[in-house]
């Protein structure tokens, strides 16, 4: 321990092996201790330094050059006789650890310092200085030269006496500096590359401007090109004003603006709408009817409505009456699948000389599909109607809105609500697309919507439509369609010539009745395709087989066994089975309602079991039927004791299919009356109607489809409610001639017509 002169420092830290010059007076002392201040006091450790040189400064001042030797632990302080402050110092030279951890820290410290110097741009001298140091303590003290370390960090490093711990602290501090410098370098490079990119784009744009000027294609020429297109588009005044306003914005912003591409896209869409284009309509009612008849068999209601529309247009034109924008036609074709709703749209366009565009709405859930997106959204587009007009290239096309009953709705909006304005003749002359944001006149468009059922179309939308019902085809119509349309089309698709394969009408009729039971003809066309594919395969294998005449045996070989049977006679041969007529979304159908009874049901009897997946309304009809039969047992011809101790079971076959509706009431009553009286139901009779507790027969819907189903099933007599008599006018004439209709008002009339007259033994 020795007593050394205290040299305090406030803003710097002197480490061993460091040489510093301080403007202080040390007298004749040869060694001093340099101690940094720390929190209004002195640090506990200082650096013992040797006075290397005394210097006289200009003006009479003095300075000394101090060379750090080693650390010293400061002890008690006292003032000597000369009034100088001295400290008792315990020398603490660094030991040299030889453990492997210290060596690892040395290597890592050297690597970090070299990376730091590389980031700072060292010329190699400092790196060589660091590499020349062999002692770990001295190596850690080199951090004292770093300008990035704070005064407090350097004091902490000086006070760390353990060499390994000091090396760890120095390494951690230098790693922090490396991380900071890496972030700064990355930011600097990003900024520099961004500036270079902007500068490069600027020069490239200037070059493009020069090239365009040489080619006379500068911004002014682009604007002039749009101006000439706007002039030629024939836009209405307000639309033209909007287009010119956007074009002025484009000119002010220039091609370099980020919004210029959006403006150009908007102008392209405005110009693409055929504002002044009209198809030259063929207003010839007779010629239009010929085209429709040539393309489609049947569908008289639809053809009549189209011909009426053309006739009115022709009359107004011939008499010079100006077109009323609120008199547009919105036809909605509602009927089962496969009846030709979609294909007749193309025929209507051809008959009227208009362009045809089809919009499939099945599964559409976004309102913007109809009205478009607002231009504020990235990637915004007009709605389907604007795109349809662009594709048609006229303002008066035929636009088919296919499957309008299958439009969905979710959080993105309700497309069917957006269609309210489109399909309202009183509003669609001023339709506004969200993207274009100008009024669009849709009054000249002939809209034709298609749907399978009317129930799923929202009531406000259905109210704006002129509904034309599509009903199923008769057997004769199906045969004619197969012969004149489906057979030639499938023959051509399978590569066969007309003379190579033939088919007779009776074969087609057996194909219709035995292999298909549908309102339309889609399944029929598939079956014809199957037959012709197999025929084409045989001819391809051996051309000598041609010509081929398709017979019933050919049909059996191609399609297998018969799939549908006319089973009314065998099903109704026993009492308790009646033939009812039903309506489904895919057309009419025949239902056989079966009733039986068994012992049970308690002392009073008359309990009822219902099966066949019946809905609530149909279950109520069955209960009404049983109550009526029980209350009028004498009229039915049943014994009054027939209900005692018995349970009744009513079943509607095809149990996997849900059924509902009141129109089976008459059939259920007849089945129970047949069971209790022992009189079978005539096998030629089908029936429909709602029944009340008093025995009155109420009207039902879907009569035409039910009659067509009865005709297809081979029934010749149909019992209908009296109030449905007027609906028979809708039934095709050839079907009315082949069948007998019995309008009735009470269930007594039904039973007299439906049950066999010869009674058998009643159930007791």
Image (cartoon, grey):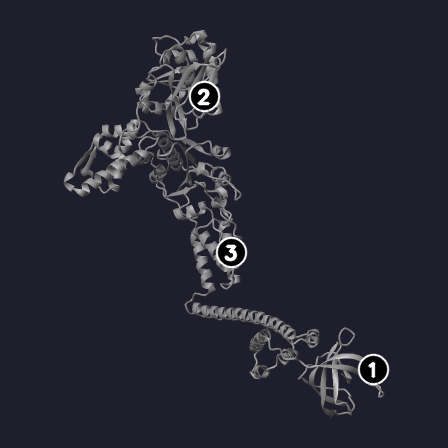
Q: Of 151 and 158, which appears nearest the observer?
A: 158
Q: Is residue 637 left or right of residue 715?
A: right
**Looking at the image, is mark 2 or mark 3 nearer the viewer?**
2
Q: Which residue is mark 1?
A: 78
Q: CA distance from mark 2 to mark 3?
A: 71 Å
Q: Which residue is mark 3?
A: 246
Q: Earlier in the sequence, mark 2 or mark 3?
A: 3
User: Is the residue 53 above or below the residue 496 in the image?
Assistant: below
Instruction: Give the mark count.
Output: 3
Numbered mark located on residue 610 in the image: 2
- Mark 1 is surrounded, within 10 Å at the Cα level, by few (under 14), some (14 to 19) or many (20 or more) other residues, namely some
Q: Residue 443: horizontal and vertical position, in percent? A: 45, 40
User: Is the residue 573 above or below the residue 160 in the image?
Assistant: above
Q: Earlier in the sequence, mark 1 or mark 2?
A: 1
Mark 3, secondary structure of its residue: helix
- Mark 3 is surrounded, within 10 Å at the Cα level, by few (under 14), some (14 to 19) or many (20 or more) other residues, namely some
Q: Residue 685: horizontal and vertical position, in percent? A: 35, 17
**Looking at the image, is mark 1 or mark 2 nearer the viewer?**
1
Q: CA distance from mark 1 to mark 2?
A: 117 Å
User: Is the residue 297 above or below the residue 72 in the image?
Assistant: above
Q: Of 670 and 687, which appears nearest the observer?
A: 670
Q: Is residue 22 left or right of residue 343?
A: right
**Looking at the image, is mark 1 or mark 3 nearer the viewer?**
1
Please report contact status of discs 1 and 3: CB closer than 8 Å, yes or no. Answer: no
């Amino acid at each position: 321990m020795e007593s050394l002169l205290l040299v305090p420092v406030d803003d710097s830290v002197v480490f061993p092996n460091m040489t510093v010059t301080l403007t202080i007076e040390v007298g004749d002392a040869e060694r001093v201790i340099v101690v940094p201040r720390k929190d209004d006091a002195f640090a506990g450790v200082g650096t013992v330094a040797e006075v290397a040189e005394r210097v006289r400064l200009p003006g009479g001042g003095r300075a000394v050059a101090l060379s750090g030797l080693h650390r010293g632990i400061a002890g008690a302080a006292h003032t000597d006789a000369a009034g100088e402050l001295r400290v008792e110092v315990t020398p603490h030279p660094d030991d040299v650890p030889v453990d492997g951890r210290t060596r690892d820290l040395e290597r890592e410290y050297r690597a970090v310092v070299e990376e730091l110097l590389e980031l700072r741009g060292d010329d190699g001298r400092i790196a060589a200085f660091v590499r020349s140091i062999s002692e770990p303590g001295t190596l850690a003290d080199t951090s004292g030269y770093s300008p990035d370390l704070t005064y407090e960090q350097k004091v902490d490093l000086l006070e760390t006496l353990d060499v390994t711990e000091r090396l760890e602290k120095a390494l951690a501090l230098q790693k922090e500096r490396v991380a900071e410098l890496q972030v700064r370098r990355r930011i600097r490079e990003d900024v520099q590359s961004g500036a270079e990119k902007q500068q490069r784009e600027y020069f490239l744009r200037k070059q493009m401007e020069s090239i365009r000027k040489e080619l006379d294609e500068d911004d002014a020429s682009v604007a002039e090109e749009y101006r000439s297109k706007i002039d030629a588009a024939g836009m209405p005044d307000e639309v033209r004003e909007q287009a010119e306003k956007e074009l002025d914005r484009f000119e002010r912003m220039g091609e370099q603006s980020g919004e210029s591409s959006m403006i150009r896209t908007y102008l392209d869409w405005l110009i693409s709408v055929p504002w002044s284009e009209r198809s030259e309509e063929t207003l010839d009612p007779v010629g239009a009817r010929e085209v429709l008849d040539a393309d489609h068999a049947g569908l008289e209601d639809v053809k009549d409505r189209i011909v009426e529309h053309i006739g009115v247009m022709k009359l107004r034109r011939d008499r010079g009456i100006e077109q009323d924008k609120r008199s547009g036609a919105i036809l909605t074709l509602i009927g089962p699948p496969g009846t030709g709703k979609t294909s007749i749209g193309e025929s209507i366009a051809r008959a009227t000389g208009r362009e045809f565009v089809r919009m499939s709405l099945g599964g559409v859930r976004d309102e913007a599909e109809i009205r478009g997106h607002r231009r504020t959204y990235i990637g915004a587009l007009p709605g389907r109607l604007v795109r349809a007009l662009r594709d048609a290239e006229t303002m008066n096309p035929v636009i088919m809105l296919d499957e309008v009953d299958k439009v969905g709705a979710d959080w993105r909006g309700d497309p069917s609500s957006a269609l309210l304005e489109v399909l309202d003749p009183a509003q669609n002359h001023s339709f506004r697309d969200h993207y274009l944001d100008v009024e669009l006149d849709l009054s000249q468009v002939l809209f034709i919507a298609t749907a399978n059922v009317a129930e799923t179309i929202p009531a406000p939308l259905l109210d704006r439509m002129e509904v034309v019902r599509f009903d199923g085809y008769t057997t004769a119509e199906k045969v004619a369609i197969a012969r004149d349309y489906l057979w030639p089309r499938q023959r051509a698709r399978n590569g066969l010539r007309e003379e190579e394969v033939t088919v007779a009408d009776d074969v087609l009729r057996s194909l219709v009745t035995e292999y298909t039971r549908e309102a339309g003809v889609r399944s029929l066309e598939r079956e014809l395709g199957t037959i012709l594919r197999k025929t084409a395969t045989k001819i391809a294998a051996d051309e000598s087989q041609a010509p081929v005449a398709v017979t019933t045996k050919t049909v059996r070989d191609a399609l297998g066994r018969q799939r549908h049977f006319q089973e009314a006679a065998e099903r109704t041969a026993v009492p308790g089975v009646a033939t009812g007529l039903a309506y489904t979304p895919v057309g009419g159908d025949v239902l056989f309602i079966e009733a039986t009874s068994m012992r049970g049901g308690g002392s009073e009897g008359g309990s009822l079991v219902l099966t066949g997946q019946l809905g609530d309304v149909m279950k109520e009809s069955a209960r009404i039927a049983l109550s009526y039969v029980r209350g009028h047992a004498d009229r039915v011809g049943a014994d009054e004791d027939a209900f005692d101790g018995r349970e009744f079971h009513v079943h509607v076959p095809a149990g996997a299919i849900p059924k509902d509706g009141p129109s089976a009431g008459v059939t259920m009553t007849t089945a129970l009356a047949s069971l209790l009286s022992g009189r079978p139901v005539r096998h030629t009779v089908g029936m429909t109607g709602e029944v009340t507790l008093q025995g009155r027969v109420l009207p039902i819907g879907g009569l035409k489809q039910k009659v067509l189903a009865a005709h297809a099933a081979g029934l010749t007599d149909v019992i209908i409610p009296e109030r449905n008599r007027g609906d028979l006018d809708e039934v095709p004439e050839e079907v009315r001639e082949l069948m007998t209709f019995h309008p009735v008002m009470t269930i007594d009339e039904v039973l007299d017509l439906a049950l066999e007259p010869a009674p058998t033994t009643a159930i007791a």
